[in-house]
Amino acid sequence: MVRTKRWTAVSALAATALLVAACGGAGDDGGSGGGQAGEPATTAGFDGTTIKLGVLSPLSGPVAVIGQPLTSGNKVWFDHINSQGGIAGKYRVELVQEDTQYKPDVTVQQYNKVKGDVVAFTQILGTAPTLAVLPLLQSDEMIAAPASLDAFWVREPNLLPIGAPYQIQSINAMDHYLSEGGGTTDSTICTMIQDDVYGEAGQEGIDFAAKEYGFEVANTQRFKVGTENYAGQIGALAGAGCEMVFLTATPTDAGKIWGTAAQAKFTPKWYAQSPSFVSALAKSAVAPYMRQYVTIAAEGTEWGDESVPGMKDMIDRVEQYAPNQEPDYYFAFGYNQARAMTALLEKAVELGDLSHAGLLRASEELGTVSFDGLTGDYTYGPADTRNPPRSTTLFSVDPSKPFGLATLKYDFTSEAAKKFEFQKADA
Amino acid sequence: MAGPHRNLVRGYADELRLFGTPLSRAGLVALVAVFLLLPTVLHDDFWLSVLIYVGITAIGAIGLNLLTGYCGQISLGHAFFIGAGAYVAARVGGDTGLPLPLWLLAAALIGAVLGGLIGPFALRLRGHYLAIVTLGLIFIGEHLWRNLTPVTGGNSGTSVRAEPAIGPLDFGDLTLFGESYSRNQGWFWLVWGLVALVALLAKNLVRTRPGRALQAVRDRDQAAEVIGVRAGRYKIGAFMLSSAIASAAGALFGSYQQFVSPDEWNLLLSIQYIAIVIVGGLGTVFGSVLGAIFVGALPAIIDRYSEVIPGVRTSVGGEGFISVFALNQALFGVLIVLFLVLEPRGLAGIWLRTKAYFKAWPFSY
Amino acid sequence: MTTFLQNCFAGLSLGSTYALVALGFVVIYKSTGVINFAQGGLLALGAYLGYTFSNNLAVAFAVAVLLCCLSAALVGATFERIVLRRMVGQPPFAVIMITIGLLFVLEPLITAVWGFEHKQVDNPWNIRTVEAFGLVFGVRDLWTIGLTAAVVLAFFLFFRFTSLGLAMRVTAFDPEAALAQGISARKVYATSWAIAAALAALAGILMAAGPGGLTPSIGFIALAAFPAMILGGMDSPAGAVLGGLIIGLAEAITRGYQDRLFSWAGDNVSVIVPYLLMIVILLIRPYGLLGTKEVRRI
């Protein structure tokens, strides 16, 4: 009795095993057929009329304050493109937005969720989430545009970065301080960086500049995101007699840091990486201090500067498609990102292949893409020869401006920044 | 021919049988069938990757349940051990290219050693005090992960190239009977196979002498000592075992995700594990798995079907007042609250009640 | 010396914030035996309510502070009334999990109402400073220390001299004996939640009035207050205040001397100092500095 039961169980198992084999795997789905020049064939994410693009962004959680305007920037650009008929005048673009909460594991899940429905990803926000998805991008031959200015994106064939990386921003800021900001190589130059990848990118640029120009970083203060009291760091910087401090931070911390510095009457020349600033800071009580001592290193031009054609267009389109959008640095970033993706899609349509592999090929043939002065021109092509823009715009804080920033020095490139070499992530 | 009734228990050994009744044997066969067939039916990479993460979480949750549910020691430091395991996988599995069983074992071993370090605290502190000390582990761990750059890659994180391969059998690129299977299919079988293995080990442990000793310590450690259980030794043992399992889960997590960064092993992760064992049911192995499925898959389901839920904003600038994740999180919170108010014994409690109902059928009440 | 004193002042201000949050933990733990994980959520809620009163409704800042504490207290008491009352007698695990559930509900609610953007609370302190004895004192820091001292004093007077305070102490000591004496445990539980929520809201609005402004992640500070509570002893209000100040001072001083004394231990040692300190003290005194030793019976 017992024996027969056991046998039933075993044979049931065997039967299931056979079934498994019969049902088959999904390993070899085969690539989609790429058409030759002419109409691109339908493929994953493209049904012949509409191109779908993925967006993996933190739409909630603490980083949503970046993810939301960035995605809105993506959207406004594509709304504009769609009103012109779409990519190459005929293919409308639709965004598939997924919330990553800025977590690598959620990003991997969401990537898997939509990868079969999209032609490419026009935004993946965050260094860690992008690195988590990178191996999958490589095995799926997928193209994605990372929404962070890390230097190691430049050499990755599966990524389509824009803008001058953080390292370039800090090198150019240093150049400005030494040439026009009243500093010399003998000045006491310090850094204050956030203890993460973003902070280290800024520090790497400063260290490179130190070698190029021959100065020494006198003191470096690291801080953890969300620190409540900065008196210790500011005291240490003041104690070291810093005449210039380069800051990489995010707005909440930057506000506390400058507030503490103002209270301690510590008045060096501050240069800060672009993400340190948000327009609310220009309306805060720290604004007078910032106005006097802070310079922000970013790209493009001030919000609403109609003399730059790209800015004029963007303002018009914001009014048309997202009238409630506040002036925002990340919005412009998303807008530019969508622009780079549009250039890539147009190239792919020209080559007649919108499949994942087709886009990867198109990215190698993509030449220089211009952003009409919103960010520097980017020379794409094979990843080894890509040349990102190396220009930076410096801003001073001015509460009367829409975004609270006024152009100090527009779009300049230092010699040192030209020499900086980009490498792959060692990971 | 009237044989004994299926529920007849003739001795303690009968009580301890894992699959004693025909019904539970049938359930086992059904589970095995689902395990084998699911990935071939469900090709969708989204659901497969959700289920793989759920499986990995279930392994870690079984570890925590052994500690919290069976031995009564609260730990908020589970995420620390998960992280440690991921880094072991990166260094031992990735850099030296050892096969799967070896790096998994190495992770478990190092996890056990790290868990042993808590020993002195476990002996000296009780209840909530211990919980908050283990919370310190998370923050001290984060400091280590950020500063031990050669091991962890520092702030930028590290890629994990530990291959899920045993000899010719590579779960990342599986070929069986001439069929090739995708990475996610292979990983599903690997992870859920390991869930079954760990669950079986845990179940076997708790019905042996050490298992009963653990529960005695949980119920009242001084009474346990009086009857000859060395409470201190078992507390440390439970910590070592639980962190060994957590590290193994972390190693799998790293190897599947292929990249890990120090931001991931935070308090939220620990809280999620605690939520799993409590929602699943303290002191039940099966409950840990149910809890992991509930906590891991529910957000995915809400996310997948968010378009049809009214008032939810699925895109920036779209209609609705609350974003998918916000809704998800709020709903998760509400569910936890409702759950515990209505069924403090967790999902396993519901399961046991349902079982008891049918066991006594037709005389159920 | 000036640097040292300046760091001490920073530590006192930080420690006062910790003390307020830790006091909230202790009040709830003492009366109900539960660690309230939602304290950070209540803190953020209080800060945002304060923002609404101060900026949108444009009431005077002092009134806004009072109103935000009162409304947070109401939220705390309501939650206790609706949810936690049903959990009396359930295992503490389950109740802790419920407070985590509350945290998970509060966070998205706050962002759904107020959004993720950076906000600045209108307040009279901002970054104004006072100078004395060659030191610079931030006005907000002075107020934080002063208000904390006042609240702590009021707190002890309340427990010492009011009948409700006495009822709370009795209930914490022996709930059954308290019930037998006709003390309403319900009222005691609700009051302790209201007090804890009000303390959290006060800490929240004091933080939000600083130059960092207000973002949804403001509640994270509650995590740093855990060691403060443990260090002092979980059931000791005086311990919470002491623990908060010790932790705040230790953190600020380590921070100030990071370069000279602690660079060997990696960057940012000050972040983990509260936890290290807590661990060391617990190894010596397992129930914290002022906590009551648990009587263990078989």
Image (cartoon, coloured by chain):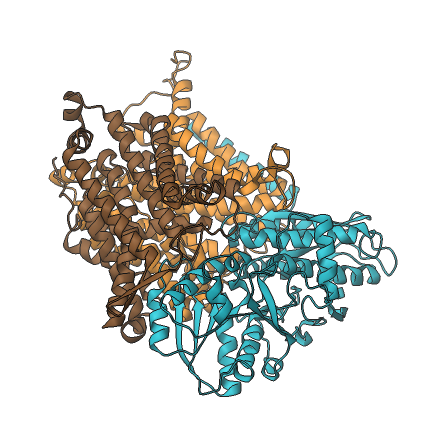
- Say which residue appears at 33% left-offset and 70% top-offset: A235
From the image, state the color of chain B.
orange
Q: Is residue C38 above or below residue A85?
A: above
Q: Where is residue C180 in the image (x, y as percent from the top left)?
A: 15, 21
Which of the 4 image quadrants contains residue B300? top right
Quadrant (top left/top right/bottom left/bottom right) for the N terminus of chain A: top left
Q: Is residue C273 visible to the viewer in this orientation of the structure?
A: no
| Residue projecting furthest to the top | B363
Q: Which of C30 and A181 is in front in this view?
A: A181
Q: Where is residue B364 in the image (x, y as percent from the top left)?
A: 39, 13
Q: Is residue B252 above or below residue B229?
A: below
Which of the 4 image quadrants contains residue B354? top left
Q: Which chain is cyan?
A: A
Q: Is residue B261 left or right of residue A384?
A: left
Q: Is residue B221 left or right of residue A9?
A: left
- Say which residue appears at 36% left-offset and 44% top-offset: C62
Q: Which chain is brown?
A: C
Q: Is residue B82 visible to the viewer in this orientation of the structure?
A: yes
| Residue projecting furthest to the right | A38
Q: Give the total of numbered labels.
A: 0
- Say which residue appears at 34% left-offset and 50% top-offset: C223
Q: Nearer the viewer, residue B126 or B96?
A: B126
Q: Where is residue A52 in the image (x, y as percent from the top left)?
A: 72, 50
Q: Position of residue B253 (x, y in %)?
A: 47, 53
